[in-house]
Amino acid sequence: MSNKINIAIVGGGLAGLAAAMKIAEAGHNVDLFSVVPVKRSHSVCAQGGINGAVNTKGEGDSPWKHFDDTVYGGDFLADQEPVRRMTDMAPAIIHLFDRMGVPFSRTKEGLLDFRRFGGTLHHRTAFAGASTGQQLLYALDEQVRKFESAGSVAKYEGWEMLSLVLDDHQVCRGIVAMDLQTLELRSFKADAVIMATGGPGLIYGKSTNSQVCTGSAVSACYQQGARYANGEFIQVHPTSIPGEDKLRLMSESARGEGGRVWVPKNKGDERDPQDIPDSERWYFLEEKYPAYGNLVPRDIATREIFQTCLDGYGVKGENQVYLDLSHIPAETLDRKLGAILEIYEMFIGDDPRHVPMRIFPGVHYSMGGLWVDFEQRTNIPGLFAAGECDFSIHGANRLGANSLLSCVYGGFVAAPSAIEYAKNVERGSTETNGIYDSELKKQQEINDEIIKSEGGENQYKIHDEMGRVMTDNVTVIRYNDRLQETDNKLLELIDRFRNISINDSNLWATQAVPHARQLWNMLQLARVITLGALNRNESRGAHYKPDFPDRNDDEWLKTTIAEYSEEAPVLSYESVDVSHIEPRLRDYSKGSKQGAKKA
Amino acid sequence: MSSNNGNKIKARLTDPPETVRVRVKRRERPDAPQYVETFEIPYRRNLNVISVLMEIRKNPVKADGTETTPPVWDMNCLEQVCGICTMVINGRVRQSCSALIDDILLEAGGNEVVLEPMTKFPNVRDLKVDRSPMFDHLKKVHAWVELDGYHDLGPGPHTPQETQQERYAYSRCMTCGCCLEACPQYHDDNYIGPQAIAQVRLFNMHPTGKMNRDERLDAMMDDDGIANCGNSQNCVQVCPMNIPLTRAIYETNREVTVHGLFGWLRK
């Protein structure tokens, strides 16, 4: 038997590709599964940049300050040790991308340029125009293509993972995946599996996420025994562009480069924004948070914008506020923000260089995800997770430009961790042979069931209804009665799901069967999010309940753990690692104050 | 677009129709014949081609009232940055997410939108095509920077703003295939096409990438190489990312010529 290790990676975004290239570099083999060609993964949508305390602006920035900002921004719910390791690694990660040829924006001297982002007072964000995620993903895609050419990475693009293959001891031995053209199912053996499938935004119907971000594969892991942590912490981005098909992101970098959020002081003011004089504009973020201004963390900016609209100040009586760049020279805007201004122009038709943009919060990111330890190991031996689909790093609220960083960091830690595991695990024993066939059969039966189901329910309508109820009740402001109603609704939808008809007699490359599989998994995960929120009677980061308006460390400085049972997710709570910084109250209305370092 | 103090004011559809007629070119499987189906959906403001297709998918009933299967198409980011949803819309190749119904109707008049799959790639089903040959082209031209390793080896090379900005323009290519669809020279893999040539330029401009320029230029001199460009300049007109493709072809061609004449001296 060869000593070569074979690791399956599910997901070809930033985290998955980061892990793939590290494993290939170490001389091992990778099977890389992705629903879309990896170059088209959701990471391309990240715009603003990647954080790392390189401190080229002479501001005295340091990885420790980055660490403190991240933990404080996350309202102390993140386990601190992995955050510390990540912020320590950040400058090297940025330099590595620079060496790989990412066209990062430059200073006049030809050094890396950095801009400001939310939740910090430092210029800490490296960027490539306003399409940083695209540029970072392409760099990794290129490196992985090199290994693909050399034969150590095999790509399965257009394949979707349906389930894990577990042996009798609940050890992960591979996956079952489906070819999205033929609907053929296959079992894949692996010495270890790394999940890197990103977030579950599609649970909310419309979000800033790409269409592949269903959380389906992660939900499958959860239903097979993986623990899902902090599901209730869903980030709603303050600035998105509402659309018929999705909410398009308007990057925080717009505010990082000086963008100002305002509404007319007179409710329902019908004038065009250019005709409203400065004295009649209410810059509510700058007024309430003089030090951070428009760059308060996302949970705070979102709540303020939401509340301002609830109070009737929304532009022209609608759910929208202005995000204004028109005071900045057009040349500067083109150079630093070109890509996102083009998106706004393309979809709305106004030129944001001259007319303030109209924006509103939109579901954006899941802080929660598969529970992992400090080495990215899940509770299932042989199963690892990295990137948005794991729960670590961001606590109760993620800071902007920390996601690209955490994806790469997670991939870089998961890779050696999985290799180490695979070296020591007993491989290919005869007793495991049957498990691949039996899992394959099980998944085939589920598909067969869906294909022959001829009930009267339309799966896309069920998806719509789930999205609407989740958006209405499990986003910015949460009430227990409405959370309970949401779970009741989800149960109703799960019931109706059993009665769907797939509506497509042609099974070749049909999207109906994969969507049905995803929808079932989304419904399960939606319950985890909703019941986690119902149970947590406090307000922390993105989780806000007017009936419990304060953070309550005595009772709730705890990680939520959800475990699957057929009836309902079983919730339990674990303590949070606070070994480095003493938890302190968040208050962005004053200047920054460093946390007390523990001895 | 007209100009008003530098503010481009976009023309808007003022008298929208009550319904949008959508003609979709379909195919059941790769070896089956193509046919057209027509759908009619109520007009709403802010529709794009994707939301029209989503509407049809929810209720796959044709304009004549008969039921059919939901059309199949690819979509992902919906922000024109992943490239996957490319198709031919009213005769023009582009991304369907950024194709706004109002703009299409304003340009074409009437209320009809015609959706067809790209023609230069194998048609999988309906509007879905297989563009994997484009990724193979990237392998062929060694579209990557060779590194000693992924461990911490310090900062990358100093780069002037000018170089960064030119490279950034090339680096935005999302492998959508618009340039190949529009190129009269590209068919049946006889010509590697503009996207790969622009990537050669991207990597040959990088201080480290440059060290492997010979491999890329050799690839450019193959039978399917840069000499096949017929200078129609269609590529640069359809590129959704405004990549200066003709400039990349010009610069690379010059490099290839020098490489062809003197390259052997360095071997």
Image (cartoon, rainbow, N blue to C red):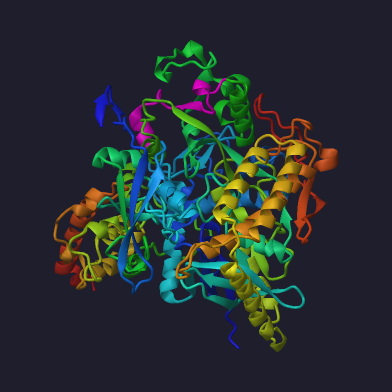
**Horizontally, is A524 left or right of B94 in the view?**
right
- Is B220 above or below relative to A285? below
**Horizontally, is A297 left or right of A171 in the view?**
left
- Is A219 above or below relative to A179? above
Residue B199 seen in render = yes
Question: Could you tell me residue B10's position as x and y percent?
Answer: 30, 31
Whether residue A334 is in magenta: the answer is yes
- Residue at the extreme right of the image, as rendered: A554
Question: Could you tell me residue A394's position as x and y percent?
Answer: 66, 46
- Residue at the extreme front of the image, as rendered: B65
**Horizontally, is A78 left or right of A175 in the view?**
right
Q: Pick the residue in front: A598 or A324.
A: A324
Q: Pick the residue in front: B189 or A191.
A: B189
Instruction: Give the quadrant of residue A441.
Output: bottom right
Instruction: Give the quadrant of residue A565.
Output: bottom right
Report the number of discs.
0
In the rendered view of the protein, which quadrant contains the C terminus of chain A? top right
- Is B17 above or below relative to B184? above
Question: Could you tell me residue A190's position as x and y percent?
Answer: 61, 76
Q: Which residues are magenta?
A: A313-335
In the image, what residue occupies the spot 33% across and 74% down? B31
Q: Pick the residue in front: A203 or A119.
A: A203
In the image, what residue occupies the spot 78% across and 31% down? A547
In the image, what residue occupies the spot 39% across and 30% down? A352
Residue A413 seen in render = no
Instruction: Give the quadrant of residue B182.
Output: bottom left
Whether residue A320 is in magenta: the answer is yes
- Is B208 above or below relative to A206? below
Question: Could you tell me residue A7's position as x and y percent?
Answer: 59, 73
